[in-house]
Structures are given as C-alpha cells and as structure tokens.
Image (spheres, grey):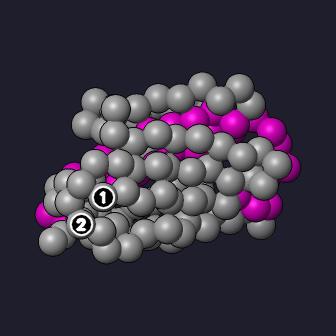
Amino acid sequence: QLQLVESGGGLVQPGGSLRLSCVVSGFTRDYYSIAWVRQAPGKVREGLSCIVRSDGTTYYAESVKGRFTISRDNTNNTVYLQMNSLKPEDTAVYYCALDPWARCELTKYEYAQWGQGTQVTVSS
C-alpha cells in the first residue's frame, strides 16, 4: 500500500529553520517525483518544490527559491525539505505528494498519493 508520512513540523521563530521529512513506502517503481505543497488557512494551495527520485532534478517556486532546499535519500526512500529564513507567512500545513509520472508541475496537483501533512508555525 502506497503511503507517504511527513514529519519535522513545529513552532519556530521568524528567521529560524526546520527540516521536513517525507518517507515513501509501498511504491515499487524507482521513477517518480515528490513534491512539497502547503496549505494555509484562507489561502490557496501552493506547490513549493519538487524532486525527481531517479536523477535528483529539482524545481522550486519563486516564493521559496533561495530559502528552501529539497533533497532525497534514495536508500531510505526519504525526501527532505530544508527550510531556512522562515517567515510568518510560511505558516501552513505542509504536505508531500507523489507523482508516478515525475512531471514536477508545481501549479498542478495531480498526485497519486498525499501524506497526512505536518503543521509549520512561524511565530515569535
């Protein structure tokens, strides 16, 4: 059974950092991509970053470019999102999602599976 499990969210002060993890299980193919998407109350869903598992190609939304870094550990089927210089407007529930076609289209949300989400709150 395909499953994505996020972790690493929490409360952090402005300017701080967090690293989110997404563990993928139950997917036997090596070719897919993982995206990070966030949803804040009263705001539209936003695709942030994506990585292709096979070759490590990465994509970023302009809103997080230079602050967030996506990476992967294929041995442990884990994708990370390192978030630095966090701002209050980064407060949201963060989800990882799997695309078996590895399209990395951050403005579309056609994913085969989503994780349960992890809350990130940036506040002093």
Which residue sits at x=25%, y=37%?
63
User: Relative to residue 3, is residue 63 depicted above or below?
Assistant: above
- State the extent of the magenta-drawn residues as a range: 24-53
Name the spot of residue 12 as percent of width and height, x first: 30, 68
Nearer the observer, 37 or 64: 64
Quote the CA–CA distance across marks 2 and 1: 5 Å
Nearer the observer, 77 or 19: 19
Residue 13: numbered disc: 2
Residue 107 picture quarter: top left
Which residue sits at x=62%, y=50%?
79
For residue 50: magenta? yes
Label 1 sits on what residue type? Gly
Mark 1 sits on what residue? 16
Circles 2 and 1: CB distance less than 8 Å? yes
For residue 29: magenta? yes
Q: Judge left or right: residue 104 versus residue 45.
A: right
Name the spot of residue 84 as percent of width and height, x first: 35, 48
Name the spot of residue 106 as percent of width and height, x first: 41, 35
